[in-house]
Amino acid sequence: MSAFLNIAYITARETPMIGWFFDSLHLQSGDDFTDLRVIVVDSNISAISKSSAISKSLDRNVIITPPKPTVWQGRHRLTKGEYWAKCNAANTALCLAEDGWISFVDDLSVLDSNWLERVRSATARPMTCTLGSFKKVKNLTVEGGRILHLDEFAEGIDSRWNAGADNGPVPCGGDWMYGHVTAPVEAFLTVNGYPEALCDSLGFEDVLTGMAIQKAGYVFRYDRRMLIYESEELHHTDVKRFKRFDKGVSPNDKSHAALARVQAGDLSIWNHYDLRSLRERILRGEPFPPPSGPTTDWYDGQPLSEL
C-alpha cells in the first residue's frame, strides 16, 4: 500500500480554478482517495465550496477550511489592514494532515499527467523532500482535467528548470524550495512548521523553511518532471490583496535579518506555539484556539496595531 499522502491547496481567490486541480487529480488517482487527503485552505471559503469539482469529492477525503486564527488577517487580526500570512495557512494544513507525507501545490494550476506518479515515487524516499516544478503559461485551456491548449513563454518557466533533468530528480539545497514541495509531514513538525512569527507580513517563507528543514537533517531533490501548469493571466486578477512588505534598505533589511537567523540555525523567532502539540489537539477534534501572538514586529518592535 502507498504511503498516506496529504495534498494542501492554499488560496485566497474568489475563483482559483480549483476545478482544474481536482479534475486532473481525479484522472490520475482513478477516483481512489483511500490513502489520500486533500486539504483546501481558503479565506473565501463560501465561494470555493460551491465548486462542482469539490462537491463531487466531498465524500472521499476532502477538507475545506479557512485559515486558522492569526494576528495578521481575519477576525483576530491586530493590524489595521489585512496582511500576507501564508505561513499561517500552511500550518493550518499541517494541523489537519494525517501522518505520512504532504504535497503543497499552487492555485490556478492543473497537474501534469504524470504528477501523482512522481509524487508517489517521492514518498518512497524517507528523510527526503522533493521539490516539484512549475510553468506559468498563457491561454491555458483545461477540460476534464486535461490540458487542451497553452502557450509557454520564457519568463514563466521555473528558474530552476535548466538545473533539472528529464531522467530523474537532482540533488539540491533547501534554499531551492518555493511552494511546490512533497515532504514527510514530520519534516515540517521537526522545525515547528512554517515561520509565522518570522515571515508572515514579509514573505520569503518557503526558502527559509526549506533551509531549516535541511539543517534538521533532511535531503532535498528537485524533480522537474513533477510539474504543474499555472495560468499567468489569472495571477494578476481575482485575488484578495494582502499587504506584504520588507522593512529597511537592502542589505540592511528585515528579509536579510531573517535569512541570517536561519543560516545561523537560530529558530528562536519562528512560531508562538508548538505546532506538534496543536496538531494533536486538532486531529482529536478540538477547535483552533485564538492566536497567541505576536503583538509586535520582531524586527523593530513596532506594535502590530500601528500597521
Image: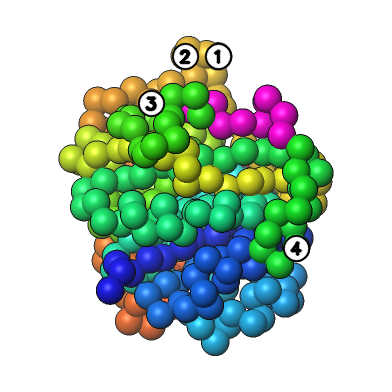
**Residue 259: which disc?**
3
Q: Which residue type carries mark 4?
A: Glu
Residue located 71% across and 39% down the image: 137
Left or right placement of residue 67 versus residue 125 in this view: right
From the image, which quarter does the N terminus lie in? bottom left
The front one of 75 and 65 is: 65
Looking at the picture, which amino acid does disc 1 mark?
Val
Crowding at mark 2 (Cα within 10 Å: few <14, some 14-19, many 20+) = few
Q: Is residue 157 magenta?
A: yes
Q: Secondary structure at mark 4?
A: strand
Mark 2 or 3, nearer chain start: 2
Disc 1 designates what residue? 249
Three-letter code for the amino acid on which mark 2 is drawn: Asn
What residue is shown with label 4?
A: 143
Q: Are marks 1 and 4 in contact (CB under 8 Å)?
A: no
280 versus 138 height, above or below: below
Please report contact status of discs 4 and 3: CB closer than 8 Å, yes or no.
no
Q: Is residue 289 left or right of residue 111?
A: left
Q: What secondary structure is found at the residue carrying circle 3?
A: helix
Query: Which residue is rendered at x = 74% and y = 57% of the image?
Result: 142
The answer to whether the residue labelled 2 contacts the one labelled 3, judged by CB atoms less than 8 Å apart, is: no
